[in-house]
Amino acid sequence: MNAVAYMVSLLPPEAKRLKPQAWIFYAPTLPGLPDEHEKWMHEQFLAAGVAVAGIDIGEAYGSPKGRDLFSAFYKEVTVKRDFAPRPCLLGRSRGGLWMTSWACDHPNKVAGIAGIYPVIDFRTYPGIDKAAPAYGLTAAELTAKQAEHNPIERVGLLAKAKVPALFIHGDEDKVVPVKENSAEFAARYKASGAEDAVKLIVAKGQGHNYWEGFFRCQELVDFAIERAKEGAKPARKEVSLGKHTFTLPEGFTIELAAGPPLTERPITGAFDELGRLYIGESSGTNAKVQEQLAEKPHSILRLEDSDGDGRFDKRTFSKNLSATRRWISVEFPASQPS
């Protein structure tokens, strides 16, 4: 299987280019495809500052070899051409099989999946017998390994990651039946608790054809643009810690270093040169300033990590204070950790 890089209107006008470049990863890119039916759609992407790119891998039908070539192409454009790390995937017909297969391997590299009557179950198209050779398997072997290779059986991986998806599919499609493909995809998302992340637009009375509504679907175009631009933003993740949820940039982690009973209401803090943490702790009182000045209800704490496990476990002193921020800034000047 020979792969030929095939860029589709690679970059938007220079004035609208982004850094990193938001992009649509499109399939299928075969001789004659994409064709004039996608022209309007691609023009909308480029006008919005979103590039379109794809690679001709032949009739791979979502096979491991095809997915490896997709990965090599992804690495080429993201590492050497400064394309964003998370494209929006767009698959038309059998291109859906290519895209969902690759997405199941790399859900963290996908900002969204859009599809025009996409194939998601290779049993419906091209069928087990025709797909098996691309996988280097017999039909019986591929049937037995569907959990490993058939994207419809792997949708749970995308649902778990809550990868947004939007498909448009005709309800009279005999080539790629909506029930076994797009509708089944949506049903499995719903069963996995990711119903809000998927939308299926059913085109009434339409089959597997060139109806203009498929290729000028504004909702699909808007979705693809929005997801592609989202994929160009720094990746972030939500992390729950106790009762709190934090949004962190990609590559960052957060851990609890100190909490009750060592400290209950930390207001400010600073480290000394020995790694000890000084905390200005509030008592939680809402008393008037003059009362706090007289009663000095707040405390300064020094916490130490005595066993070196990264969590403070020793509180060595406290002191009654009328304020917490000023005490630390005056008595223990220190730079905040970066």
Image (spheres, helix red, strand yellow):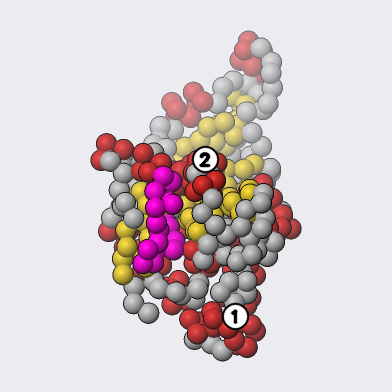
Mark 1 closeness class: few <14, some 14–19, many ≥20 residues within 10 Å: some
Residue positioned 31% across, 66% down in the render: 5
Location of residue 14 with respect to 192 vertically, above or below? above
How many numbered markers are drawn? 2
* Disc 1/disc 2 C-alpha distance (Å): 34 Å
The three-letter amino acid code for the residue at tag 2 is Gln
Residue positioned 64% across, 16% down in the render: 292
Q: Would you say 181 lies left or right of 47 here?
A: right
Magenta residues span 25-42
**Label 2 secondary element:** helix
Q: Would you identify the image quadrant in which residue 320 lies?
A: top right
Mark 2 closeness class: few <14, some 14–19, many ≥20 residues within 10 Å: few
Looking at this view, is 311 or 238 the one in front? 238
Residue 40 painted magenta: yes
Looking at this view, is 26 or 169 the one in front? 169
The three-letter amino acid code for the residue at tag 1 is Ile
Location of residue 122 with respect to 274 vertically, above or below? below
Place of residue 266 in the rendered image (x, y in percent of width and height, measured from the top left)? 59, 34
Q: Would you say 38 lies left or right of 317 here?
A: left
Place of residue 330 in the rendered image (x, y in percent of width and height, measured from the top left)? 43, 26
The residue sitting at the left extreme is: 14
Place of residue 288 in the rendered image (x, y in percent of width and height, measured from the top left)? 66, 12
Residue 307 in view in this figure: no
Q: Would you identify the image quadrant in which residue 233 lies?
A: top left
Q: Which residue is mark 1?
A: 128
Residue 36 in view in this figure: yes
Q: Quadrant of the C terminus?
A: top left
Q: Which residue is mark 2?
A: 218
Residue positioned 49% across, 23% down in the render: 326
Q: Quadrant of the N terminus?
A: bottom left
